Amino acid sequence: MKNKLYVPEPELISCPESRVIMQGFKFYPIIAMLFIASEIIGLTLGPRLINEFGLLLPGGILFFPLTYFFIDVVAEVYGYKQTRHLIWSNIFTQIFYGLMVYVSLAIPSAKIIENPENYNLVLGHIPHMVVASILATSSSYFINAILLARLKILTKGRYFGLRSISSTAIAEAAFSIIWVIVFFHGKLPAEDQVWLILSQYFLKVGYEVCATPLTYLAAGFLKKKEGIDIYDYRTRFSIFSLELNKKNDS
């Protein structure tokens, strides 16, 4: 039998769906898996800079913007608390990934392996990248989730496309600046860092705009199939909590 939590929303008393029943979610685990996979792919490929369309871009540019798609969908459908739990799960996964890579590279390679230094060349940046990524993604994801949740209340659930684009645009700016400065400080000239920030920012925002119809459809599909549409009226938007069920955060 599924566990059910009854969550009243008195502020929505005039709405016929003023009460929400949270059940075991069928699609959320898949979304969480794809979100974290996109994050790890972007983290691994990010330092491999590429030139496309005259822009200087991180190598994970095709995959990493998907993380904001998933954050938008989770925040819109499942609410801020579930999104916060997903963000912290991602942070712990990155720490574990970086630690395992660091330990593995510290172990001497077998003599039968040719050019073992190539492993260090390719993967040696991962621990530093994890630090930069955690600082950048944790800041930007929380900005995105909090803005989207608050705007949902202000607009009474309307204009999801506009809310998604605006919250992601602000969050992407925070990510681009923090990640480039932390990871590429001393590795790239200042002018290249600025160009890298601007290039990836505008491409990611464009990516978000183009993906908005898909984001809208995905959120609508999940609301219908999961039977849930959370409004964070009672949420205090603390970032230092993994609580999912209490009506008020500490």
Image (cartoon, grey):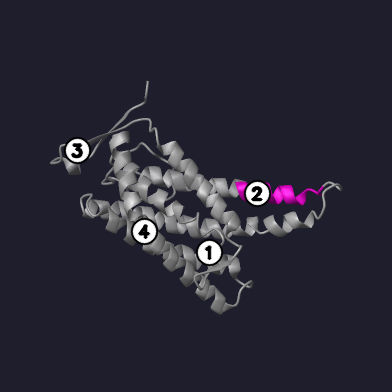
Percent of width and height locating residue 125: 66, 59
Pointer 4: what residue? Answer: 210
In the picture, measured across the screen, residue 188 lies left or right of residue 16, that is right
Mark 2 residue type: Leu
Mark carried by residue 179: 1
Give the residue pinned by disc 3: 18
Q: Label 3, secondary structure: give it.
A: loop
Instruction: Classify mark 3: residues with Cα within 10 Å, few (<14), some (14-19) or many (20+).
Output: some
| Mark closer to the chain start, 2 or 1 | 2
Calculate the distance from the C-alpha at mark 2 to the C-alpha at mark 1. 19 Å
Where residue 205 sits in the image (x, y, percent)?
Answer: 39, 63
Q: How many marks?
A: 4
Q: Secondary structure at mark 2?
A: helix
Give the residues in magenta. Answer: 97-109
- Amino acid, disc 1: Trp
Q: Residues within 10 Å of mark 2 (few under 14, many from 20)?
A: some
Describe residue 97's horizontal placement relative to residue 198 as left or right: right
Q: Which circle marks residue 99 in the picture?
A: 2
Residue at the far right in the pictured view = 111
Q: CA distance from mark 4 to mark 1?
A: 24 Å
Q: Are marks 2 and 1 in contact (CB under 8 Å)?
A: no
Under circle 1, the secondary element is helix
Identify the amino acid type marked 3.
Ser
Q: Check residue 100 for magenta coloring.
A: yes
Can you say whether 167 is above or below 35 in the image? below
How many residues crowd mark 4 within 10 Å: few (<14), some (14–19), many (20+)?
Answer: few
Q: Which residue is drawn at the image coordinates 22% and 55% (left, top)? A: 154
Which numbered mark, 3 or 4, is in the foreground of this view?
A: 4
Q: Are marks 2 and 3 in contact (CB under 8 Å)?
A: no
Give me the C-alpha separation between circle 2 and circle 3.
45 Å
Residue 123: x and y in percent read: 68, 55
